[in-house]
Amino acid sequence: MADDASLAQARSFFAEELRMVCHLGSESVVAAFGSVPRERFAGKGPWRILHQGGDGYWSTPDAEPHWLYHNVLIALDEKRRLNIGEPSLWAFHFDRIGLRLGERVLQLGAGSGYYTAILAELVGPNGRVDALEIDEGLAQLAQRNLEGWPTAQVRCADASRPIEGRWNVIVAFAGATRPLDWWLDALDSGGRLLLPMTGANFRGGFMLRLDRRGEGLAARSAGWTAFYPCVGARDDQEDAALADALKDSAGQQAMRSLRRDRHDKNDSCWLHANGWCLSKRELH
């Protein structure tokens, strides 16, 4: 078995690789990925790793934890294709969203708690991470895994049902067809939201970034992505509208705001739905 020193070195190399691959500017993001032990959240090895290039899952040669310190997805439930997600994806987004010490974070979908721990490292001892996980077994596992991070709390809950609180940052770890009203209402002044907007057929779509500016919400696309679906945050009609909108890549890049006022569809609408719209109109 690898000793503590060699594992610490593996984590350090892993974090430095993420720095280069993702062009990370935040030292705290690099430090968080270099300090949280991924093996604590992955269960017993050997582990099943998902190769997204086409040949599916494969097993690590043995149960040495150093195999986990690469930019790979680790199976939590292979039958459901539920994984600990790709480190480079989340390192990139955590860096760009600018998580700060003392902030309050709402995580929608905790899994086994690995990224919950990363978030807790980023907001520090005076911050807080509230994580919702709909799978009871995973929620219990995540809370046990997070014993070393007292500022992170996991509850078994459906993220489509409102809970009390306001947060500086809301991050969804499952794909939706719209940002739910209560998520938007729970975003504090100056708050930021990351939401994978994904289609039902292949889970693909884009990462929606929202920034609260006064009463308004600035919106932009933060890149292509694919995710496990978010229970309670999907609608067949909205899925069809999203699939149609995604055909207009130029319009996606021109997105500037999220509108919640009812209005007729016009040329400024990129994704127009019932009671909300991703618009090319600038915030005023």
Image: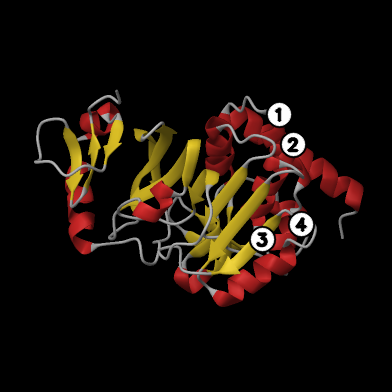
Whether tag 2 and tag 1 are in contact, CB under 8 A, the answer is yes
Dot in front, 2 or 4: 4
| Residue in view at x 26 percent, y 43 percent | 260
Label disc, if present, on residue 273 of the rendered structure: none
- CA gap, disc 2 to disc 1? 6 Å
Q: Residues within 10 Å of mark 3 (few under 14, many from 20)?
A: many
Q: Is residue 117 left or right of residue 244?
A: right
- CA gap, disc 2 to disc 4? 19 Å
Secondary structure under the numbered disc 4 in the rendered image: loop
Judging by the rendered image, the residue that carries numbered circle 4 is 150
- Render colour scheme: secondary structure
**On screen, residue 38 above or below 159:** above
- CA gap, disc 3 to disc 2? 21 Å
Judging by the rendered image, the residue that carries numbered circle 2 is 31
x and y percentages locating residue 122 in the rendered image:
68, 40
Instruction: Name the residue type under label 2.
Output: Ala
Q: Of label 3 and label 2, which has the lower sequence position?
A: 2
Judging by the rendered image, the residue that carries numbered circle 1 is 27
Q: Is residue 6 left or right of residue 46?
A: right
Label disc, if present, on residue 153 of the rendered structure: 3
Dot in front, 4 or 1: 4
- CA gap, disc 3 to disc 4? 7 Å
x and y percentages locating residue 64 in the rendered image:
78, 59
Instruction: Name the residue type under label 1.
Output: Glu
**On screen, residue 240 above or below 18:** below
| Residue in view at x 75 percent, y 64 percent | 63
Q: Residues within 10 Å of mark 2 (few under 14, many from 20)?
A: some
- Near-viewer residue (83 or 269): 269
Secondary structure under the numbered disc 2 in the rendered image: helix
